[in-house]
Image: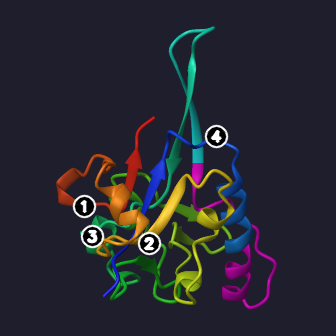
Amino acid sequence: MTRYGMVINLKTCIGCGACVAACSEENSIILSMIKEGAQVKIGSRTDIEVVEEGRFPSAKRIYYHHICMQCEDPPCVKVCPTGASYITKDGVVLINYEHCIGCRYCVVACPYGARYVNEELRAPDKCTFCYHRIKEGLLPACVEACPTHSRIFGDLDNPNSEVFRLSLRAVRPNSPKGTNPKVYIIPP
């Protein structure tokens, strides 16, 4: 069984936003299909926050990535009253929009602030690791678009994978209440 995960290397990220643009484009297409061919434009399911550390002229820019942490024990799934938020057999946290009633419990429960309300869908939304792509053997759009290879994706249980090797020297974002996120960060 594959256990998908991602490492984001903040040492190599240049903050270009290619990941954000690729995510927005890819998921606008997917959401158009969900809404039966209607043109749906969304914001990205990932974002980059620019933080300046230090003082001018020696200030350093750090690019923090906001993305669903794909928790192994996700609070968003626990609070969903309809089962619309669920975990696939390979551990990816998804939303079934047909079952979602828009209560937003999952948005409130996410300790990372990774869920938001998509006004077009009238439902919560989040990163899916481009599940439709990985099931076809492709990389998530954000990973494929990154010109500096700062987002690395793969099987966290495969010792021969790059994501496995990098996760050993990366850190997990704060894991409140044992959520065990599967997105790792290599600090700048």
Q: Nearer the viewer, residue 7 or 38?
A: 7
Q: Which residue is mark 3?
A: 72
Q: Position of residue 77 (x, y in %)?
A: 31, 74
Q: Residues within 10 Å of mark 2 (few under 14, many from 20)?
A: some
Determine the secondary structure under disc 4: loop
Residue at x 59% of width, y 51% of height: 47
Tell me the CA gap for discs 2 and 4: 22 Å
Residue at x 71% of width, y 88% of height: 33
Task: Please name the amino acid that badge 1 sits on.
Answer: Asn
Q: Which residue is mark 4?
A: 14
Check contact, mark 3 vs mark 1: CB within 8 A. yes
Determine the secondary structure under disc 1: loop
Instruction: Tell me: 110 left or right of 16.
Output: left
The mark lying in front, picked from 1 and 4, is 4
Task: Please name the amino acid that badge 3 sits on.
Answer: Glu
Q: Position of residue 159 (x, y in %)?
A: 30, 71
Image quadrant occupied by the N terminus: bottom left
Q: Which residue is mark 2?
A: 154
Q: Earlier in the sequence, mark 2 or mark 3?
A: 3
Check contact, mark 2 vs mark 4: CB within 8 A. no
Instruction: Tell me: 37 left or right of 53.
Output: right
Q: Position of residue 23 (x, y in %)?
A: 66, 65
Q: Earlier in the sequence, mark 1 or mark 4?
A: 4
Check contact, mark 2 vs mark 3: CB within 8 A. no
